[in-house]
């Protein structure tokens, strides 16, 4: 762990080799028990923008100007990255960030897990980590805007659709 | 105007006495043409917290710890207040704020107009001013969460409900 801790000052390892521990949940990360593999979460915001772009490309998101991505990372309240570490090499496999007023509301944006490691519980772990961070800062209202195909993914995590009829709205220039 | 400009360094007057000009729209503010009255918008975030609490009380919102309100004002991306100025006295009659990543997304919170001046177009003017500010900062995605009874208010302003099936969700602790 010493190597890793030096790389990321704000990082937190939630796994041990082979299996992954998330908030008390034990999750099988790989079938190959000989492979040393760890999943590490970090709140470091000084990410390699090209690595992040590659991750977003992999799920088919439209490219965004890197200058604006950089600004958004700097000015988000929370930036969470998820890394796979194997034989002292790291690979960005997940990302999420949140805007906030640092007091009442936080809104989560850009949740993504690399297609090669989807459907293994990592998206859930990423979101749980993000929520835990926001809650530990005493932020009461955690919100997001969900694409239709991921509404159920968020629902399983405790997100409620249109609670008490509150509706998500987007402004479009007339 | 000199008096006012000194009070609020970040203020903008959009009215002249008697009538109110919003983005080229002319709006009758008062029937009494003898009363000197101006509506002024400000982005000053150093508001009197008690005055703001009074405004929120007036529309029946639950009280919030002033310490957290202070933090939220400091850490919001944009804070807009709307003032009625009459005979050199000012009165807080409207408020809105937005969180943002300063690049892609902004989310508008706590939109309120004092009940005594509702239904005169001031809520619309407040929102237009807020949107104009966000757009002038090149923020592309303006969002909000609307209570059911104000969905139509926002719709008239160009906000779209669940565009392409994107859904607003709120996290509740399980
Ligand atoms: C959405 C995403 C982050 C999920 O990541 P993941 O690692 O595959 O998710 P997990 O394996 O942790 O799934 C957790 C649970 O949600 C379910 N789930 C995952 N994706 C789902 C989906 N699209 N719809 C419904 N349920 C889904 C899983 O079956 C699992 O259920 P379980 O707890 O009952 O076993 C990932 O698919 C992704 O990056 N998609 C592309 C980007 C995207 O659409 N992001 C959201 C933008 S709003
Ligand atoms: C919602 C609120 C800000 C509107 O302010 P307002 O000054 O009364 O609104 P305006 O007079 O500018 O109204 C603009 C337009 O919206 C309409 N409108 C206003 N309130 C409306 C409502 N509740 N439902 C539907 N339409 C509404 C007006 O009829 C007007 O329509 P027009 O342009 O066709 O003439 C104000 O009622 C308020 O502060 N309410 C309490 C707090 C609240 O609920 N805030 C929203 C939290 S999500």
Image (cartoon, coloured by chain):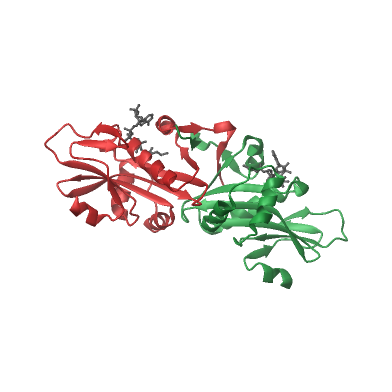
Chain colours: A green, B red
Residue A58 visible here: yes
Residue B96 in which image quadrant: top left
How many numbered tags mark residues here? Answer: 0
Residue plotted at (61% across, 54% down): A130
- Residue A124 in view in this figure: no
* Placement of the C terminus of chain A among the 4 image quadrants: top left
Q: Position of residue B125 (x, y in %)?
A: 33, 37
B142 to B53, vertically: above or below: above
Q: Nearer the viewer, residue B110 or A99?
A: A99
Ligand 1 in which quarter: top right
Location of the N terminus of chain A by quadrant is bottom right
On the image, the x and y values in percent for residue A155 come to 63, 40
* Residue drawn at 72 percent across, 51 percent down: A122
Name which residue lies at 56% across and 45% down: B172
Q: Is residue A100 left or right of residue A58?
A: left
Choose between A94 and B61: the one closer to the eye.
Answer: A94
Where, by quadrant of the figure, is residue B72 drawn? bottom left
- Whether A116 is drawn above or below A47: the answer is above
- The location of residue B57, given as percent across then percent down, is 32, 45
Horizontal relation, residue B127 to residue A159: left or right: left
Q: Name which residue lies at 19% across and 34% down.
A: B30
Query: Relative to residue A124, is residue B156 drawn left or right?
Result: left
- Residue A8: x and y in percent read 66, 67
């Amino acid at each position: 762990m010493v190597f890793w801790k030096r790389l990321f000052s704000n990082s937190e390892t939630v796994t041990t080799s082979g299996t992954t521990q998330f908030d008390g949940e034990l999750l099988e990360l790989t079938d190959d028990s000989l492979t040393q593999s760890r999943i590490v979460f970090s709140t470091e915001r000084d990410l390699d923008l090209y690595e992040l772009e590659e991750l977003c490309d992999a799920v088919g998101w439209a490219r965004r100007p890197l200058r604006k991505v950089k600004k958004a990372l700097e000015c988000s309240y929370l930036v969470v990255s998820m890394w796979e570490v194997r034989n002292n090499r790291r690979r960005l496999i997940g990302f999420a960030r949140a805007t906030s007023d640092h007091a009442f509301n936080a809104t989560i944006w850009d949740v993504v897990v690399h297609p090669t490691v989807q459907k293994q519980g990592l998206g859930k772990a990423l979101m749980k980590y993000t929520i835990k961070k926001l809650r530990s800062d005493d932020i009461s209202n955690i919100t997001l805007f969900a694409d239709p195909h991921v509404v159920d993914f968020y629902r399983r995590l405790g997100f409620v659709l249109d609670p008490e009829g509150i509706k998500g709205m987007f402004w479009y220039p007339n």
